[in-house]
C-alpha cells in the first residue's frame, strides 16, 4: 500500500520536476531553470524547496553554506498518488471514468490514442 501524500501546488510541482530532472539541485539551480520562463524570487524557491522537504518530497544535505536537494520520492510514486487522489475525488473511485475522459479528450493526438490502445492490449495479453 502506498503512503498518501499531501497535495502539491503548481509551483511545488514545477520545482519538483526540476529537481527530478537535475538529480541534485541547490535553490539557485532550480531558480535559474524557472527564470528561463518567468521571474521568481530566490526566497520563493527557497521556501518552496524547504516546504517540499518538510512534506517528505525532497531530502537535503548541507554543502558549505548551501543546501543540496534531491528527490525523496520517485516521480512514479507521486504520479500514482496524485492520479489515485483524482480517481477517488473527481471520478468517485472509477478508473474507467478517468480513462474514458482522457480518451475522449480533444487534446489527445491520434498517436497518443494508438499508444493507449497498444498499452491496454499489452496488459490484456
Image (cartoon, rainbow, N blue to C red):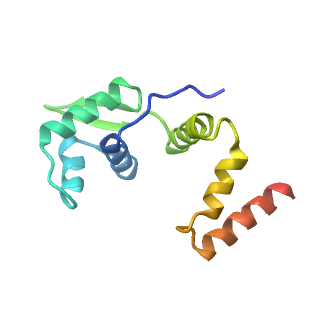
Residue lying farthest to the bottom in this orientation: 110
| Placement of 120 over or under 57, stated as above or below | below
Quarter placement of the N terminus: top right
Q: Is residue 21 left or right of residue 87?
A: left
Quarter placement of the C terminus: bottom right
Image quadrant where residue 108 sits: bottom right
Where does the image place residue 10, in percent across and percent down from the top left? 34, 44
Image quadrant where residue 27 sits: top left
At x 20% / y 61%, what residue is drawn?
A: 36
At x 60% / y 37%, what residue is drawn?
A: 84
Q: Is residue 22 left or right of residue 31?
A: right
Where does the image place residue 104, in percent across and percent down from the top left? 64, 63
| Placement of 110 over or under 32, stated as above or below | below
Where does the image place residue 98, in percent across and percent down from the top left? 64, 49
At x 47% / y 35%, what residue is drawn?
A: 73
Instruction: Out of 23 and 90, give the one closest to the viewer.
Output: 90
Where does the image place residue 111, in percent across and percent down from the top left? 62, 75
Amino acid at each position: 500500500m502506498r503512503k498518501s501524500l499531501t497535495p502539491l501546488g503548481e509551483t511545488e510541482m514545477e520545482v519538483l520536476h526540476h529537481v527530478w530532472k537535475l538529480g541534485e539541485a541547490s535553490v539557485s539551480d532550480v531558480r535559474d531553470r524557472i527564470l528561463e520562463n518567468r521571474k521568481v524570487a530566490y526566497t520563493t524557491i527557497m521556501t518552496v524547496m524547504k516546504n517540499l522537504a518538510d512534506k517528505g518530497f525532497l531530502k537535503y544535505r548541507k554543502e558549505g553554506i548551501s543546501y543540496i536537494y534531491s528527490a525523496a520520492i520517485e516521480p512514479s510514486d507521486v504520479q500514482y498518488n496524485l492520479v489515485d487522489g483524482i480517481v477517488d475525488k473527481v471520478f468517485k473511485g472509477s478508473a474507467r471514468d478517468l480513462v474514458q475522459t482522457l480518451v475522449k479528450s480533444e487534446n489527445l493526438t491520434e498517436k497518443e490514442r494508438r499508444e493507449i490502445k497498444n498499452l491496454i492490449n499489452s496488459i490484456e495479453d
